[in-house]
Amino acid sequence: MEGKNISPQDELERAGLSDDDILRGKVTDKWRSFMKGQIKRARMFFDEAEKGVRELNSASRWPVWASLMLYRQILDAIEANDYNNFTKRAYVGKLKKLVSLPIAYGSALMGPSKLTQLVRR
């Protein structure tokens, strides 16, 4: 979607950013602040979604847990890239994915708190 801004206009305006700022692709303090807010909100939504995973049927839990875990890791990657999602790709590497999937499966079967207790032993 090169050349197109799909960010919420009112939030950009409150952050002191314009479409031109975004299209220039420069990471500024205003951009970092904006992205920190977006990431904070995304994590809040993920936390809320996590509460509802337990209500899903067992066949649906694993892919939802996997998605929650991997998307959280993408947010971590954006932060690690100093919020530069203009020229740096935020992704989860294959090894991290391979490690995350069994954890997601365990969370789907036992719930995250029980899995955490087992892992800590």
Image (tube, rainbow, N blue to C red):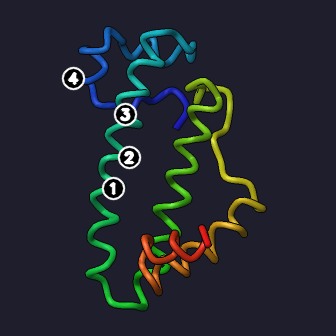
Label 2, residues with CA under 10 Å away: few <14, some 14-19, many ≥20: some
Q: Earlier in the sequence, mark 3 or mark 2?
A: 3
Query: Which numbered circle lies on residue 47?
Result: 1
Which quarter of the figure has residue 34?
top left
Give the amino acid at mark 4: Asp
Q: CA distance from mark 1 to mark 3?
A: 14 Å
Q: Position of residue 16 (x, y in %)?
A: 32, 8
Q: Disc 2 vs disc 1: Cβ atoms closer than 8 Å?
A: yes
Q: Position of residue 86 (x, y in %)?
A: 60, 26
Q: Quadrant of the C terminus?
A: bottom right
Q: Earlier in the sequence, mark 1 or mark 3?
A: 3
Q: CA distance from mark 1 to mark 4?
A: 25 Å
Provide the residue designation for mark 4. Answer: 10
Tell me if residue 23 comes above or below residue 103 in the rendering: above
Give the amino acid at mark 2: Arg
Q: Please, what secondary structure does the residue beneath circle 2 have?
A: helix
Provide the residue designation for mark 2. Answer: 43
Query: Which numbered circle lies on residue 38?
Result: 3
Residue occupying image coordinates x 68% and y 31%: 88
Tell me if residue 9 comes above or below residue 28 in the rendering: below
Q: Disc 1 vs disc 3: Cβ atoms closer than 8 Å?
A: no
